[in-house]
Structure formats: C-alpha cells, structure tokens
Image: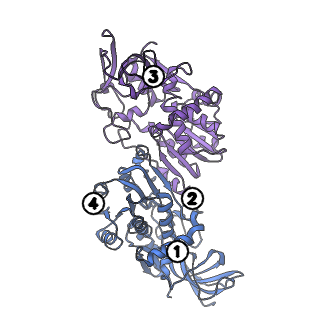
Chain colours: A blue, B purple
Amino acid sequence: MSELLNKQYRLAKRPVGEPGDDTWEFCEKPVAQPGADEVLVKIQYVSLDPAMRGWLNEGKSYIAPVQIGDVMRAGAVGEVIASNHDGFSPGDMVVGTLGVQQYAICNGKELHKVDTRIAPAPRYLGVLGMPGMTAYFGLLDTGKPQEGETVVVSGAAGAVGGVVGQIAKIKGCRVVGIAGGAEKCRYLIEELGFDGVVDYKNEDVMAGLKRECPNGVDVFFDNVGGDILDAVLARINLHARIVICGAISQYNNTKPVKGPSNYLSLLVNRARMEGIVVFDNSKHYGKAAMEMAGWMAAGKLKAKEHVVEGIENFPNTLMMLFSGDNFGKLVLKVTDN
Amino acid sequence: MSELLNKQYRLAKRPVGEPGDDTWEFCEKPVAQPGADEVLVKIQYVSLDPAMRGWLNEGKSYIAPVQIGDVMRAGAVGEVIASNHDGFSPGDMVVGTLGVQQYAICNGKELHKVDTRIAPAPRYLGVLGMPGMTAYFGLLDTGKPQEGETVVVSGAAGAVGGVVGQIAKIKGCRVVGIAGGAEKCRYLIEELGFDGVVDYKNEDVMAGLKRECPNGVDVFFDNVGGDILDAVLARINLHARIVICGAISQYNNTKPVKGPSNYLSLLVNRARMEGIVVFDNSKHYGKAAMEMAGWMAAGKLKAKEHVVEGIENFPNTLMMLFSGDNFGKLVLKVTDN
C-alpha cells in the first residue's frame, strides 16, 4: 500500500473573516499502514458544514478548535481498505470524523458502519448523519412543536433546514421556510411540501413572514442569525420556542456578532431561546435514525445532496455554504468509488 | 366629600427617549363619588417601576399602553374611605393598579386587601407586591436554581434584584449581585448576605464576574440588558438559564435596543434565555406571599423601600430608576396617612 498517495487539507493559519488562500495548506503524502486496533479508510465523500468555520477560531467552544498544522476536521464516509481492528473488515462502509483528505487511519471506536444498500453513501453525511440528527433532536426536544402550530425555519433549503421542515410537517404543523432564491423556494414547496416560503434574497423578510404566518410563529429553528432572527422575533407568539442551531450570517464577521435587537420580544411573549449541539444526543442517534429511515421509506422525508467533485476544490466549495450557493447537503467527492 | 381635591399625573405625550417635561400633565380636580360596586381609595404610596417606561410606548406588548390623556398607570396602596362594594369598608387598606394620583375610584374586583399590622404599607408594593412576586416566580420557576450553583443578578439593589438574591441564598446558591456604587455593594454583602458583588460603576464587569464567579454562572436574572447581559453571557456554564425580567439600560433608547452580541454562547453552552411577566403567576401570588412572609419573619428576607414624598415629585422621582439613584423599592408618598 506504500504506493498510495493521500491528498489532504491542513489548517495553515486562522482566518480573520472569510477563510482565504492562506488559510489552508494542501499536502500530498504517502499513506501509512494502520497500527494495532487501527483501520485504514479510503474516503469517498467529505461533509462540508457551517460549523467548520467555528472550529477554525481559537477559544472556548463546544469542541476544541482545529490546531494549526492539523488535517482539517470534517465528517466523512468511506470504505475500509485495511483493518487491524476486530470490528471492521475491508469492504465495510463507515462514517466518522475522518478529515478533509482521501485516506484516514483511525481508531475503530471513532467509526460507525453504514449500509449503502439502504441509502447512498453521502446520505449518511446528511439526513442520516449529523445534519439529520441536529434537525431531529433540535426540533423535537427543544422546539417541541405541537400539531397546528406554525414552525419557521431559516436556511430552509440547507442540510438541516430541509429536514426540520419535513419533520414539522410530519408532526402536523404549518411550516414556513426562509431561503434564498426562487429555485430553492419552489423546491421547498413542491418537493418538500412546505406550506409557505420567504425568499430573503428577493423580498422583505418582515413582510414575507407577515404574509406566510398569519397566526404568528410558535417555533423558530434558526440556522442563520442576524437580521432574519430579528425579523422572526418580531412575529413570535406567546410561549414561542426559538432553537439556536447556528448563525451562518455571522460566522465570517470581522466585527462583533449582531445580537438580536428584538430579544425583548422574549419578555413580552414569555418566550424562550435555547442553544443546541447535536453531540449531546449521541446516545439516541440510533433510535432517531431508525425513525427517520421509516419516514424516508414512507416517502415523507426526502433528501437532497449537493455533490462537488475533487478534493482540490475544498476551499472554494466550503465558501458555497456562506454565499448560499449550495442546494441541499453539501459534500465533496474526494476519490472514486 | 365634594371638598376633596385629587392631584394626579396624566400622560400628555409619548416620550421619545427619556420622559421629559412635556410627557406629563399635572391635574387637580374634585374627587367624585363612587358608583355602584365602586370603592373610593385614598392613596398613600404609589409604586414606581421600570416597567412604567414601557407602558408609555405605543404598540403590542404584554399589556396595553397607557393612552394619551389617561391617568398614568401605577400600582399603589391606600385606605378605603368610601365603599359601595360589599367586600370593602372604610378603613380597609388595599393595593391595586390605582394610578399616579391621590384618590382613586375603582371597581372592587381590582383591589386586594392588605394587613398593615403585618408589614408597613409600602412593603406591599415591594417584597410583598409585584417586585417580590416577579423575583419569586422568575427565579424559582424559570431560573430553577439548584443548591451549590452560582446565581448572578443585575440591578441587584433594586426592588426585584434584592429579593432574587436573597431567595437564591435561601436555596443554597452562591449569589453575586451587580449594582452601581460602593454603598449599594456594601449593602448587598453586609445586609442581604450576598456572596459577592460587581460594582458596574467602578469596575470592569467582565473582570468582576471572573473574580466573583470562579465556577462560572448557572443562573442569570437580568433586569438591565445591554453590556451587562453580554458580559454575563461570556461566563455562563453548560445548561445555564438566563431569566429576562427587564432591560432598564435600554428603555430610554432612541436608537434600536442593543441585542446581546454574545447570544451564541447559548449555543456553545446549550443554555436558555427566557422572558417572564409576573402577571402569568397571579393565581399563585397568595402561596408565594405566604412563603415570603415566613422568610421575612425568620429574618432570611429583608426589605428596603426608598420613599420620596410629594406627588409633585413624580416626574423626577421616576427618573431615579434609570440613573440608578434609588436604593431599594422606590415609592412615592402622595398623601399623609
């Protein structure tokens, strides 16, 4: 296996604002042999997620930052091609935090087997992976939607947002998505069954929310922050629940984060704003995945992946998340399968 | 009774920013006779509360705004001097939303009798009134402090803050108050038994919190908003609860409210920010007042009222709340008793 070459991206410098050319170091080096209890995985798809931007910052967060010189952290799915671990054999398909690279050597306990006969490999990075789990637990455990309530989700055509909206529909809610552009909005209505959409790139969000949420907003699942969070805060109902999943509009700020000016709407409406991190629910992933797979089989939960090919495209592809150019779960195909 | 004159303040004009001379109309008019089922109350003390600033603004809130020309809304305590209501007799001491005036005629169902042998009249506007109920329910039901946790309260020497801190002590918490000035800080430590104080007028709040909260912040009861809310957000622990009771630093803004820049600390820490309005708990006031009276009798809950005399001083006295010049529950004595 010594002839195998591994292409990878390492963190060269912490970015200020948007990651740029000097953020990454592209490396190519021979693939090593797995040690005792280790597994060698040939990665097929690398997951690109908004949270990755946060991992580049120094300082306390819910997970340690990526260190300078380290392979960039990322979820990925691939095939075991060599194993010194009893639990894995060549040919097994696995997911784990394998990094932005083509080959990974890792301890078996960081890996989970997946069955690509049930769903294609990239889906285990989307609906059946972290974004799906984030949507499932964030909406159901923290948002607590009740039948007949109005649920609004921002970043609605993204990996998490699309799942949030579909689960809210399954629970009998009126679902309104906020997304950018006519194509995404059409998709939310026609493909995913949303009841209403607000196109933040082409209309006033306040006016759109007023039109689509005539009975106000009971649950808001926020992936974007900024002005959109403020607009929704102005429309919430008594005892509304706001789930803070992310704030992609603020991640590349060089100025302080824009805090929600309308936060006193929480007081007026005795409402709640609560943050979530998916890892807290890891014990219950299995049960959730099973329920989600059932919904998928029943045609109630649809998945969409946006695949970009070539590991060399990692830096530019990551930026699609911040410009909103991805449409569905963004993954990078890094080797042939 | 036709010779009685009633001095009162009415809302003349909605203020932009701080209420000024043109906000109020001072009137003097003869006292009318109570009608069927009505009661005439001679008011002794009028309650001055930060929430009154919000009632001057047009627009949707948790209560309708005061209308132009109306007597300014305020809680008050006084003596029944004439009654056409079976439940009240002359000599009864009562509290209710009686307005900024010396005499009020009102429907008996808006009044509650109080016993001034148990506690002096102004205390029914403080610890045993709305501020006390706000502290009790906001801290216990929404903040949910657990023994050994660190509870921080802003506006700590105010009517609500002082009670919050003392109840948190009763519940076995480490209690840190944020207040302005050495005298108030000394009072919190020496009289009310707080464990630590941060003097926001004389030190950096971030540094003070770091010193006084070595184990972080589990519950924050916020009365002030602005930079202090951001400073505390930077120090919260996993699963912290932030109770939004008010934002006095922002009430006279002519610019948009400063939203909390550090709100993503809610995400990092899976923490919760929730608004409260005391009226929601009105069914349970009786039980709470009984428990509070027990703590007072046991010396565990102390009360402090700041009494200013003369109804003519209403406009300036109200402003003491915003400059932080009051020390304890601020009341206006409007007639002799």
Measuring from the top left, give residue B76's x and y in whole percent. Answer: 43, 24
Taking the image as shown, residue B81 lies to the left or right of residue A125, namely left
What residue sits right under mark 1 in the picture? A290
Secondary structure category for the residue under label 3: strand
The kind of residue tagged 2 is: Ser
Of circles 4 and 2, the one toward us is 4
Q: Residue furthest top?
A: B3
Upstream in sequence: badge 1 or badge 2: 2
Q: Do residues under tags 1 and 4 come within 8 Å of each other at their CB atoms?
A: no
How many other residues sit within 10 Å of disc 4, few (<14), some (14-19) or many (≥20)? few
Question: Label 3 neighbourhood size at 10 Å, few (<14), some (14-19), many (20+)?
Answer: many
Picture layout, residue B1 above or below residue B144: above
**Amino acid on which the number 3 mark rests in the picture:** Val
Q: Are marks 1 and 2 in contact (CB under 8 Å)?
A: no
Whether residue B267 is visible: yes
Give the crowd class for mark 2: few <14, some 14-19, many >=20 residues within 10 Å.
Answer: some
Q: Is residue A102 left or right of residue B60?
A: right
Q: Which residue is mark 4?
A: A203
Q: CA distance from mark 2 to mark 3?
A: 53 Å
Q: Mark 1 is on which residue type?
A: Met
What element does badge 2 sit on? Answer: loop
Q: Are marks 3 and 1 in contact (CB under 8 Å)?
A: no
Please check whether the numbered discs 2 and 3 fall on a single chain. Answer: no
Secondary structure state at the residue bearing disc 4:
loop
Instruction: Please provide percent x and percent y for residue B67.
Output: 29, 32
Q: Which mark is residue B94?
A: 3
Quadrant position of residue A67: bottom right
In the rendered image, which residue does mark 2 sit on? A61
Compare marks 1 and 4 and give the one earlier in the sequence: 4
